[in-house]
Image: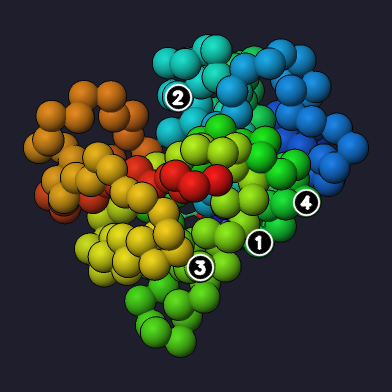
Amino acid sequence: MRLRHKPWAKEFIEEHPEYVISSPCQKNTSWKEIFNNNNPLYVEVGTGKGKFLDNMSVKYPDINFVGIEKFESVLVTGVQRVLETKPANLKFIHGDVNDLLEYFNVGEIDRLFINFTDPWPKKRHEKRRLTYKSFLSLYEQALRPHGEIHMKTDNQGLFEYSLESFSKYGMKLKNISLDLHNSNYDDNVMTEYEEKFSKKGQRIFRLEAYLSTK
Ligand code: SAM
């Protein structure tokens, strides 16, 4: 992904603590307290410019959403977006998915979304893929028992790798689609990258994964 450096992004983000939790060590608090309700918590890792979660937050007002994005210059667009739409049920974390357990308590997340994350096709970069086993272990800890991971990608290689990675980890898979936009799944909310890739005619792959034994 090409990043445009925005030197003002850091300050802009810091000016909006109502939407971006900038020091997200949540061990002593819970997201229920932050949102001030007991609604379920859905998290997107690598949220980018936040379009998916912004639309999800409108469609599902009784669910709390949190997006994690590591680059300020990308996240800032999400912050600008929510300053317009003003959702009460959406917050962002400026941070790294590797630190997931700094941001969430064990078993706190109800559902996790992995949308169009970087495929890191080179074998030597396998550990960076957000469906590598070390990430699955973080997700397992942060998810509630039977919590689900929903993944979408345009990248067949990453999708095939992820099917195997989830499965080797002991997760069960369901609702697998090899061509989401030509399937009977009618609950889809598009992400920024999904719009971009599907306009180019690329197929979208989707799966749901969960641990049945937890
Ligand atoms: N999910 C969005 C979508 O579907 O439009 C954005 C997809 S974009 C290709 C992937 C995003 O994940 C980038 O904005 C990148 O900075 C972010 N990302 C990648 N690895 C990350 C990590 N370890 N922690 C937080 N964000 C990460």
Q: Sequence order check: which comes first, mark 4 or mark 2?
A: 2
Q: For mark 3, give the secondary structure.
A: helix
| Front one among 101 and 198 | 101
Q: For mark 2, give the secondary structure.
A: helix
Location of the N terminus by quadrant is bottom left
Label 1 crowd bin: few (<14), some (14–19), many (20+), radius 10 Å: few
Please state if 24 lies on the left or on the right of 57 as rendered: right
Identify residue for label 3: 133
| Image location (x, y in percent) of residue 92 | 65, 37
Q: Is residue 185 visible?
A: yes
| Image location (x, y in percent) of residue 157 | 26, 69
**Residue beneath the point at 31% across and 60% down:** 163
> Does the closest atom of ligand 1 sit within 8 Å of the Cβ of label 1?
yes
**Tag on residue 98?**
1
Identify residue for label 2: 56
Amino acid type, callout 1: Asn
Q: Nearer the viewer, mark 3 or mark 1?
A: 3
Q: CA distance from mark 2 to mark 3?
A: 27 Å
**Tag 4 and tag 1, C-beta contact below 8 Å:** no
**Tag 2 and tag 3, C-beta contact below 8 Å:** no
**Residue beneath the point at 23% across and 46% down:** 176
**Tag 3 and tag 4, C-beta contact below 8 Å:** no
